[in-house]
Amino acid sequence: MTGAPVRTLLLWCPDWPVLAAEIVDGVPATGPVAVLHANRVVACSEQARAEGVRRGLRRREAQGRCPRLTVVDHDPGRDVRAFEPVVAAVEEVAAGVEVVRPGACALAARGPARYLGGEEAAAERIVEQVAQSCAVESQVGIADGVFAAGLAARTGQVVAPGGTPEFLAGLPVEAVDRPALADLLRRLGVRTLGDFAALPAGDVLARFGFDGALAHRLAAGRDHRPLAVRRPPVDLAVTTDYDDPLDRVDAAAFAARVLAEQLHDRLAGHGLACTRLGIEAVTAHGQELHRVWRHDGLLTAAAIADRVRWQLDGWLSGSTGRAGARPARPTAGIIRLRLLPDGLLTRAGLQPGLWGEAGEERDRAHRALSRVQGMLGPESVVTAVLGGGRSPADQTRLVPWGDERLPARPGPPPLPGEPVERPGGVPSPGVRAGTGAAGRPLSSSGVAGASLPSCAVAAVAGPAPDRPGSARAGSSVGTPGQVGAAPGQVGAAPGRVAGAERVADVGRIAGVGQVADVGRVAGAGRVAGTGGVRGGNAVPPWPGRLPPPAPAVVLPVPLAATVHDAAGEPVVVSARLAVSAAPARLVVGTSAPVKIVGWAGPWPVDERWWAPAEARRRARFQVCLADGAALLLAVEAGQWLVEAIYD
């Protein structure tokens, strides 16, 4: 709560929702117009009121009173957009404007009154300014506090200093704009604000609650808070015009340093620093050039000067780019240079890291890469950002140096040594074919004890097994709880088997990829409920993503390949993910066949089936070749592809 209220000048535009509809949508406000929200009238024009339309009427009743009524839906955004020019016009006369609501704004009356020769003169000047600038009719009220000034604006009054309680005392209780409270007060015999203000504040709080106590304070002429004035944004940009056009790099470098120091001093004067810098240049022929530079830390005067110099060098020298491409050179010298700071922070608002995030080497590398961007363009230097996705290509996005490092798809990247409690388990490209750990046979997919997780992306309808923990020979299709072909999963729930010991070493690959200790849980008792994660946590994002380790090289364009079995026949995967035979040889393009010594899969992915243009349905395999190479293969629409290469 505050003490004595401040002398306040409030500008009020009558029937503003109606005027906003005229300004934005062209609805003539001179006719009968009503603005409706929730099927009730919230504002109406003067002609509509003359025919009996009032606020709060239902639509049918309002149209019954005025058959020619034009009905407009209430749009708060439209009201705000249309009122912004009015606020700007008031700010041309006086500073420190607070927007109370669309159609009303307030400011302290002391400044304009002293400058313009009195409160009445200030009110007349502001009304005239709004009428000339925006062609909008308005009224001004001046009183002690925003609430009283708003009521005074309804009649265009200037309440004398100290006379606000007497001005409010004769007004009806409906002026507090709380219909339920006003109705209750009238039934209790309290009909005016003066009667309401005379009640003890403690009794009002006990009977009507906090909102009633606030209305009681307003009725007594005391505001509950001071004005929250709107401060016009400070123009921090610096501009310099040159009589002699700048067409040499050395002259541009000197101009850049002078202008950079001016910008840095202006920001320092406001206790600010910038993380982005806009550079604008205008040539003698009217050509406009613009570039935005971004920096991870705060730009110092030297850093600003360097970036401006590099950018002018890139514009004026027309350095040769890749493949002999030459950036467009301005047709004339630069006559105007403008620097616009963006991403403003207080000078103490950036906390550098402790290790590897700051230092002379990092700054030197950043300066070199930024200079390359200035000469060749922002796309010439890119860095990789890891994100979500089910394949290595989806999890990586190349971002220009200095831009915000946002992933292409949401979701945290996989961490080294992630536990098994994640859909898409552990098999590596080096899993041996034939036998698994402890001499147990592998399934047809080459993975010991692996099964298709219940939360896999592709829904595969397979034949029911004879008993839990078994699978039909020659097929990698499984149901929850059987041995199938999903990566590193035991049972239906990722990493959980009821009645069995913890899967201790599923996440470790021994030697060239032999899965250790998976056989301990093979054939265990009943399988826990599908889709669960130990500890009750939510299912992690991107179920069905490839397990670690990640491939070392992701091919930008997959290579066509062919996979044959031991008899030389092409290996195919059915719609139910049944592999026709064990892969034995791989042919990539026109190269010689290479023997496959180990493989894991298939791992199905059926993505975005609801969007035909983006839908993809494929099965993925990890294979280990006789020459020591490990590859990530995918079969899509009957075609085998090499997507990535492992170390």
Image (cartoon, grey):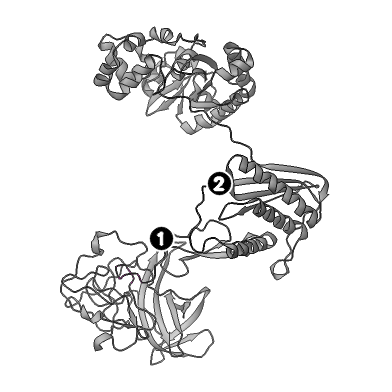
- Which of the two discs, 2 and 1, sits closer to the camera? 2
How many marks can you see?
2
Name the mark on residue 365.
none
Image position of 126 with respect to 393: above or below: above
Residue to which mark 2 is pinned = 347
The reply to whether the magenta stretch includes residue 421 is: yes
Specify the quadrant of the image occupied by residue 202: top left
Name the mark on residue 411.
1
Specify the quadrant of the image occupied by residue 118: top right
| Nearer to us in this view, 577 or 230 | 230
| Nearer to us in this view, 483 or 364 | 364
Q: Which residues are magenta?
A: 417-424
Residue type, mark 1 in image: Gly
Residue 155 lies, in percent from the top left, at: 49, 11
- Residue at the bottom extreme? 567
Residue 450 lies, in percent from the top left, at: 28, 77
Q: Are marks 2 and 1 in contact (CB under 8 Å)?
A: no
Q: For mark 2, give the secondary structure.
A: loop
Residue at the (25%, 11%) spot, across then down: 188
Can residue 137 be seen in the rendering of this structure? no
Residue 7 lies, in percent from the top left, at: 50, 16
Q: CA distance from mark 2 to mark 1?
A: 32 Å
| Nearer to us in this view, 359 or 247 | 359
